[in-house]
Amino acid sequence: MKNNEQLSPFGDASDSQRRNVGRQDSDAHMHWPVTELSLMHRAGLLRHFLELDVHDRRRRFGAAPSDTAVRAYVARIHFERDTLFGVFDEELQIIGVAHLARASEHAELGVSVRREHRNRGVGGALLRRAVLRARNWGVRALFMHCLRENETMMHIARKQGMRIVTEQGEAQAWLALPRADASSHFGEVFAQRVALFDYALKSQVAGARRLVAGLKFSQARDDQ
């Protein structure tokens, strides 16, 4: 039997949902810059998914795929059709990924965050960024499928105003989306510019750290 917490898949967003999505739009660039990924990030995506343990793979994919299956999944990602977003740490490693796939009337989202970075807002930042893209695609609903035991994603979904149906250990979360407008388009442009600036800054800092480490190693070798 279904436990319908608030299901309304394809209807218009209510006033409260519109206010909630508006808050998400204004906060999309804050705290965790979220970068739109491209072909050049495929290797980093593979590393991210391979680092997920059995339990985390099951929460992300609904099953626990082997390394071979994970490699096949990453190889099949169509960057021109779907959209992927990522959050990077100080070493430019991907710590969180959102895969947004477009259907005719809705968009489907899958999110994964490395264990040590959970409960710090990464998943919420990825979801807010995905909402912006889904709105600008013109779809009217965002859908996520996850296991009921995935309490972290269930919490993020509820916090962002998604409506959830649970059945036999699985959950489906829906968010009715308002139409795209100037603020959603500007929000995406601004969020990506902030993310690119953040990435460039982290790249410079990481390069400086490597240079200092190299100089220290060279000096230590000369002192021997």
Image: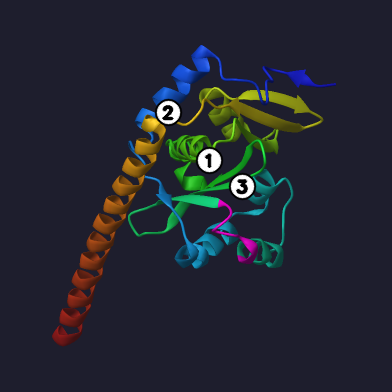
Seen in the picture, residue 2 relative to 98 is either above or below; the reply is above
Which numbered mark, 1 or 2, is in the foreground of this view? Answer: 1
SS label for mark 1: helix
Give the class, few, some or many, for how many residues have Cα within 10 Å of label 2's Cα (few <14, many ≥20).
many
Residue at 62% x, 45% y: name it. 102
Seen in the picture, residue 154 relative to 33 is either above or below; the reply is above
Q: Earlier in the sequence, mark 1 or mark 3?
A: 3
Three-letter code, disc 3: Ala
Magenta stretch bounds: 75-82
Three-letter code, disc 2: Gln
x then y, percent, for residue 45 = 52, 60
Which numbered mark, 2 or 3, is in the foreground of this view? Answer: 3
Residue assigned mark 1: 137
Q: Earlier in the sequence, mark 1 or mark 2?
A: 2
Q: Picture quarter containing residue 202?
A: bottom left
SS label for mark 2: helix
Residue at 74% x, 26% y: name it. 166
x then y, percent, for residue 100 = 57, 46
Indicate the quadrant containing the N terminus: top left, top right, bottom left or bottom right.
Answer: top right
Residue assigned mark 3: 101
Label the magenta part by its dominant secondary structure: loop
Residue assigned mark 2: 24
Q: Earlier in the sequence, mark 2 or mark 3?
A: 2
Indicate the quadrant containing the C terminus: top left, top right, bottom left or bottom right.
Answer: bottom left
Tell me the number on the disc at residue 64.
none
Q: CA distance from mark 1 to mark 2?
A: 17 Å
Q: Are marks 2 and 3 in contact (CB under 8 Å)?
A: no
The extreme right residue here reads 1
Q: Nearer the viewer, residue 69 or 216?
A: 69
Q: Is residue 123 magenta?
A: no
What's the image's color scheme? rainbow
